[in-house]
Amino acid sequence: MKFLNCPLKNIKGIMRILNILLGLLKSIRNPSCFNEFFDWFYPDYMNTLAHVVQTCQDNLDLHKLILKFLRELSSNQTHRLKLDNINAFIMFKAICPILFTILNYHTNKEYRPIVIILETLRNFLIGRYISFDYLGIYNDRCFIDLILKLFTVILTIDIKDYYPKLTNVLYSFLSSFFSIRIKDAVKYLVPELFNSILIMLYYGIESQRSSLVLPASSAIEEISHFFSLQILNVKSEFLASVKEILVVAEGTLLKITEELIRTICFDDEDYISLLLSPLYSLISIDKRLFQEAKKTLFTKLPNTDSISKLDGFLDNIANTIEFNGNPEDRDKFISNYLDISKLIKETYS
């Protein structure tokens, strides 16, 4: 493998070796074997990989193969990576700058690298071997900066040009990101960026394609729960940021809720929960804002008996929520939300 240090001389040889290593990685299924492989690979060959990326900037096929290798390296489907394994953290820290570099080299027309990077980042989230709270304590921004860079690239793509694979992976990543509950993630979310993310999700709901509606709805639910829990934490230093973000996103939350009301099956409690998640976020900000938002929403919907029932029902829900930032109100606030699905189902039965 010595010729890896001269990447321009033998790109085909590099790709051949990466394919061999990729196959080897897929066969590693326990922590001891992974540690043995990683101790051999890091730091020398990981640094060589970073050097190859920088030297061969325009070789998309090579970059895609490197990304596939890093995606497999970060995968934890067989639980070969543990939270207390220092190699897992070192691997995470080594991969992030390589992904960042590759993002700098490819235009927004190259969807495949973006898909693989999203899948790699999702591996970090669902693998349960990285302590994101630890990163926050030491103000380590490597992961957040990579996500912000990624979305900067994604937002330059016309949303109508998304192909299903990119859209599904994006929605799955968002769902995983907000379900992990990274407690200091809020301070890095620029309100306009978050609103743009919601617009992407709205596209999935509006498409009425089941392959997009379900993952988009799941992401919306996780996002709404994330922000509502932030608001319920009355000691949160990010409370002002949360409210600022949600106020900016109010219009998009309304559009999402309106589209869900048009298409949802009221016999399915899971769908009912998804329907109410955006409204739940608005209630969490301010009851007055919720009433204004609800009024705007229902003026856009057809005047039917079902919509009138839902209108009055949501008024009753809002009136039962008296959360004013007091810790003793928290349980009542949460229990009201847990009862929403049953009450709506009764309304429509």
Image (tube, rainbow, N blue to C red):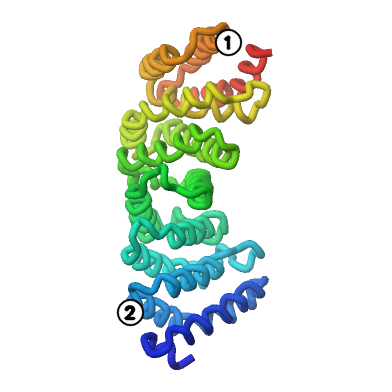
Residue 26 falls in image quadrant:
bottom right
* Circle count: 2
- Tell me the crowding category of disc 2: few under 14, some 14 to 19, or many 20 or more residues within 10 angstroms, Cα based: few
Secondary structure under tag 1 reads helix
Q: Nearer the viewer, residue 43 or 8?
A: 8
**What residue is rendered at 37% in x and 57% in y?**
109
Position of 271 relative to 63 (above/below): above
Taking the image as shown, residue 340 lies to the left or right of residue 141, namely: right
Residue 296 x, y percent position in the rendering: 38, 15
| Numbered tag placed on residue 257 in the rendering | none
Determine if residue 137 is in view.
Answer: no
Picture quarter with the C terminus: top right
Judging by the rendered image, the residue that carries numbered circle 2 is: 55
Secondary structure under tag 2 reads helix
Q: Are marks 1 and 2 in contact (CB under 8 Å)?
A: no
Residue 328 x, y percent position in the rendering: 49, 24
Q: Amino acid at mark 2?
A: Thr
Question: Distance from label 1 to label 2 (Cα)?
Answer: 62 Å
Position of 213 relative to 332 (above/below): below
Taking the image as shown, residue 36 lies to the left or right of residue 140, namely: right
Q: Amino acid at mark 1?
A: Ser
Q: Earlier in the sequence, mark 1 or mark 2?
A: 2
**What residue is rendered at 45% in x and 36% in y?**
203
Judging by the rendered image, the residue that carries numbered circle 1 is: 306
Residue 141 x, y percent position in the rendering: 35, 58
Residue 222 x, y percent position in the rendering: 52, 38
Q: Nearer the viewer, residue 49 or 59?
A: 59
Determine if residue 107 is in view.
Answer: yes
**What residue is rendered at 46% in x and 60% in y?**
112
